[in-house]
Amino acid sequence: MKKRILLYIIGAALLAVAWIFSGNPTSPNDFSSKSKIALREVGDRMLRADGDSTSLVLPIKEVADNLFQLSFEKELSMDPGLLVSTFENSLHNAGLTDEYIVEVIRTSDKEVAYSYQMNTGVEETIVACGGRVLPEDEYRIEARLLRPAERSLELHWGYLLVILGLIVLLDFFFFRKNKNRHESSDPPHLSVGSFRFFPDQNKLVKKSEEISLSRKECELLAIFVERPNEVIKREELTKKVWEDNGVIVGRSLDTYISKLRKKLQQDETIKLTNVHGVGYKLELA
């Protein structure tokens, strides 16, 4: 029982650790602020790569939850390969997310000129000609960033379920094994109604209650259990229990039978009856 409690305590501690570390302490405001800073850095690098060191990156807008808009003061050409690497580096350095969707939209006709999705470091290019440099035009970039807390939610519950499953498996196999070992180590016994009779230990057991037997009571009961529902003559009982041991008694048999009968009376299906003038019989339902 103590080992089982210890296992549950360890399991609870692991669950608490998983709960703490699978979450993310970044608040929504912090995430928004860091995202805007990272996206401004992306815009600055894209302008410099286009040879523009004077025009401005317009203020970053969060147009919806986790959806940010990056716009430029002037037209520019855009290299999709550079865009992908710049986004990845800036978001990584800011400690943000590695799962996001980026769309480059022409402002004039609102058409998507280039888009791609990053999913745990794997690029999935949507536009087939994504490797071509986009000609000079007025573009805006929209980036939908998956908030770290949202990304970790499935991992969060995944960790908890895995740890809980391990606890259940350990509990089942370890304690089932111990239980089987305990049951298999149970000393040999005989069934007498609802009792378990342990001749070598001079006792009866009914559920968790132990009933002690004297040596003579035990020897008598062993004889009756071997031949249930059969009349056993007084002479045979006396000979096996007393005379074979060099002791001859008078009314001792009746006295021990009476004691034994009282101890068996907890089970109404058992009767130790006197067959007048002949002997005794252990009646089992």
Image (spheres, helix red, strand yellow):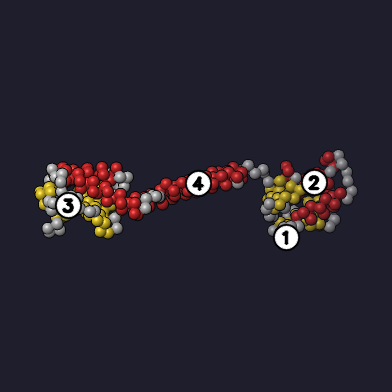
**Label 4 vs label 2, nearer the camera:** 4
| Cα–Cα span, label 3 and label 4 | 51 Å
Q: Are marks 4 and 2 in contact (CB under 8 Å)?
A: no
Element at label 1: loop
The residue drawn where x is 52% and y is 45% is: 10
Return the x and y of residue 217 as percentages of the image width and height.
79, 48
The residue drawn where x is 16% and y is 54% is: 105
Element at label 2: loop
Dot 4 crowding, Cα within 10 Å, few <14, some 14–19, many 20+: few
**Label 1 vs label 4, nearer the camera:** 4
Write down the quadrant of residue 69 in the picture. Answer: bottom left
Residue carrying label 2:
214
Residue pushed farthest right? 250
**Precedes in sequence: disc 3 or disc 1:** 3
**Precedes in sequence: disc 4 or disc 2:** 4
Residue carrying label 4:
13
Element at label 3: loop
**Label 3 vs label 4, nearer the camera:** 3
As drawn, the label of residue 14 is: none
Q: Are marks 3 and 2 in contact (CB under 8 Å)?
A: no
Could you tell me the amino acid type at mark 2?
Answer: Ser
**Precedes in sequence: disc 1 or disc 4:** 4
**Precedes in sequence: disc 3 or disc 4:** 4
Is any atom of residue 223 visible in this view? no
Could you tell me the amino acid type at mark 4?
Answer: Ala
Dot 1 crowding, Cα within 10 Å, few <14, some 14–19, many 20+: few
Residue carrying label 1:
268
Q: How many marks?
A: 4
Could you tell me the amino acid type at mark 3?
Answer: Phe
As drawn, the label of residue 72 is: 3
Could you tell me the amino acid type at mark 1?
Answer: Glu
**Precedes in sequence: disc 1 or disc 2:** 2
